[in-house]
Structures are given as C-alpha cells and as structure tokens.
Image: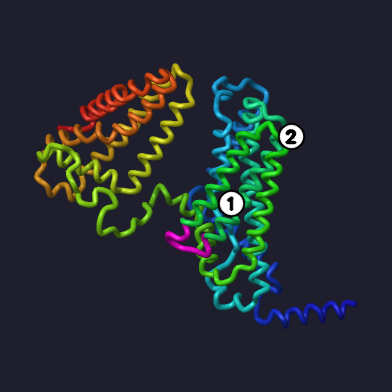
Amino acid sequence: MSGLRQEGKAARARKAGAYAFPSGKALFRRRLVSHFHEQWKMIRTAADWTVLLYILIPGALLGGRFYYGFWQGELPDWVGKLPFALFLLPLVYLIVSGSVLLFLQEGDALFLRQRERWMQALIRRGLLYSLGVTALKLAAVFAVLLPFIVRSQGVSSGAAWSLLLLTVACGWCVKLLGHRVKVRYQGFRRWLRLIPAVSVTVGIYVRVGAYGRDDLWLPLLTAAVYLAVGAWAFRSRLRLRGTFLGDVREDYKQRMRIAALLLRGVLDKPRPTRYRPWIFRKSQPLLRSRDAVTRFAAAAIKALLRNPSHLKLYLQFTGVALIAVAIVPSFLKWPIYAVLLLLMAYWLSSFWLVFSGDDYIGILPFTKGQKADAGTKALPIMLMPAALLCALVVCLQMYGIWGVILFIPSGGAGAFIVGRMFSGFRFSR
C-alpha cells in the first residue's frame, strides 16, 4: 500500500512538472499566507507593534464597556428619533467599497496560464475567500449597530437575523457583480454598467431594510433573490475568459489598499494632466468688480474649485456638517452650526494663506495689505455655500416653512461675520 502511495505521489509530481507546488490548492494557500505577511509588513512600517498594543488593548476595553452600556443602560432619546435607514449607511459603505481578491500575479501570464485547472482553483478559492471576508466585515459592523437597531428601533430578534442575512447576501451580490464589470470594461463603459448594477442593488437593500424591518419574510425573500443573482455571477465569473490583465489590475488595487490608506495623509494622489480646467474653462470673470484685489480674490475661489482634492474635502466637510446639524437636538443646532462654521473658516483661511504665499503669486506686485484685502473678500464667498446649506437644514427643522425664508439671511450673515472675523486675526496687513 505504501508503495502504491509513493508511486501516486511520484506521478503527481511528474504531472506538475517543474512547478514548486503540486496543485492549485497548495498555491492558493501559499499566496494567502504571503498576502497576510505583506499586509502585516505594510502596517508595521507605519506603527510599531508595542504602540498598537498600547492603543488596541485600552481601546478594546473601552469599546467593550461602551458596547455593554448600549445593551444595559439608557440610550439617548434622540437615537430613537433617527430614521432607520440611517443605521444602514455604514453597512452600505462596506457593501459598495472594496472588491474581490483572486490572488493572481503578473508572472502568471508566463507560467500559470498554461495550467487552466490551477487558474480555476485560484479564482474559485479567491472568490470564496473574498465573500467570507465580506460576510465577516458586515457581521462585525452589524453587531456594533445591533443594540441601536433592537433597542431604539424596536426590531425583533427574528427580524434582526433576517436583516443580517439580507445584508450579507446583498454584499455578496454587489461584490460579484461589481468585480465582473471591473475586469471586463474600462473608462466610460465601466461606469455606465457599474453604477446601475451597484445603485439598483443597494437601493433595493435600503428600501427593503427600511420598510421591512418588522417583517420576517420580506428580507428573507429578497436575500434569496440576491443569493440567486450572486450564484449566477459566481458561475459566470468562473467561465469568463480573456480578463487576465483586468484580474491582475484589480488584485493589485486590493493588495495596495492598506498602503494607500497609510500614505493618504503623506502623499497626494497624482493628478492627471489637464490642458484646460474642468470648470471656468474660458476663465470668465467671477466677480463684478475688475480691480486687482477683486480679481485676486476670484482667482483664489477658482483655484479652490478647480483643485479636485480641495473641492472633495470641502464637499465632505459640508456633508458631515449637514448630518451633524440634522441629528443633534434643537437646543444644540445653532451652537453646533456656529462651531462647524468656525472650523470651515479656519480651513479656508489656511487655504488662502497657502495660495497667497505661493511662489507663483509672489511674482505679482501685490503688497501685504492688498493680499489681506483680497482674502477678506474671498473668505466669506468661499464659506457661503456651506453656511447656506447648513442654515437651510437648521431653519427647516426648527421653523418649518418659515425656514425657507430665514435660512438665506441667517446663513449669509453667518458666513460674512465668521469670514470677516477670521480675516481680521489671520491675515496680517
């Protein structure tokens, strides 16, 4: 019997040829271990393990104490007033972020593509691994949200389990559909297919989760549909051919996610070369006056809007501010509005100082007083959109229909006062 076993091993070794691994399963295990080592090395480059222990252990203890309090103690009254769909937003973010990892590498184009069974083994196990990681992430975040869903929203335990199954099924369906589109298409054609596939799937999930939270069978039936679509996408992905370069490109993006996250605050993302700006393409005048100070202020406003990173940060801060003033109690809305406006004005004033102190601006014959006058004009204008939107939310919630009339003077006055205040003590003359 031992002789037959040794002959079988020798036959498999001869069949494997010069490859270092006897099967695609062994190659997958090796690449999975290498992936974990690679991710751990990336984390170690940014933080020492002793520092991580000093942060993670107290953080875990403190988080566990808070989590126990959410189950046993009293929840704030305003938590029960939040719409149920708001609790699904963290889950939606996890569903739409990330993709599938197949553990394919560039060198496989020379060696591994000749062995179709090994490629299929890598792809199949990579898909199963990615779906398992997706389920674990969604279950962890769902467990954190569970005390709020059960205690503040009155969801039963059976409905909570069905909602978890719906969430995991939706996550699997979105990951598989999105990956299938990403590896097959590029450019405009990719977004033309990816946006409807993801938005429709997630929209149905939010709709069913919000309106079927007290129902046990509606989430289960929807989850069954998601699982059926996901099974079709899984089988279709295994039969897909001619996507090797797309698979390698998507795998590289997923492997570098931690590195991109760690370097986000250190290195700026390379910007594509533009021969014409995407906004104000004809460089038309923004403000009515044509004097030098006003034109300098208008140039700063255009620079803020034309820079994608600055504009993205402005929109992100405005979105967070809108959510903050919307969910706080009524007696805190105007104080929170004022604090957020001060934070926004501080960042915009810092942007102005960097813009006006640029070497290219130094070529122009502007005095220190003229730069301060231009900043005094530009800062309230840059602050105005965020101030008006936040004031609209506050006024509508506090004053009803009268808020449509009151938000313009209140938001405009807030932007003007805060902008002038920061201009007075941050722009030296």
Taking the image as drawn, is residue 134 in sight? yes
In percent of width and height, residue 154 lies at: 66, 26
The vertical placement of 237 against 81, above or below, is below
The residue singled out by tag 1 in the image is 174
**What amino acid type is highlighted by mark number 2?**
Gly
In percent of width and height, residue 67 lies at: 63, 30
- Is label 2 in a helix, a strand or a loop? helix
Q: Residue 409 versus residue 41: which sits nearer the camera?
A: 409
| Mark 2 surroundings: few (<14), some (14-19) or many (≥20) residues within 10 A | few
In percent of width and height, residue 419 lies at: 25, 29
Measure the C-alpha gap from mark 1 to mark 2.
Answer: 24 Å
Taking the image as drawn, is residue 335 in sight? no
The magenta stretch is 182-191
Question: Which residue is located at x 72 percent, y 36 percent?
Answer: 216
Q: Is residue 346 magenta?
A: no
Is 319 displayed left or right of 281 in the figure? right
The residue singled out by tag 2 in the image is 158
The vertical placement of 196 against 84, above or below, is below
Is 105 displayed left or right of 215 in the figure? left
Q: Quadrant of the N terminus?
A: bottom right
Q: Residue 243 versus residue 118: which sits nearer the camera?
A: 243
**Quadrant hosting residue 144:** top right
Q: Contact, CB < 8 Å: mark 1 with mark 2?
A: no
**What amino acid type is highlighted by mark number 1?**
Val
Question: Which residue is located at x 58 percent, y 56 percent?
Answer: 177
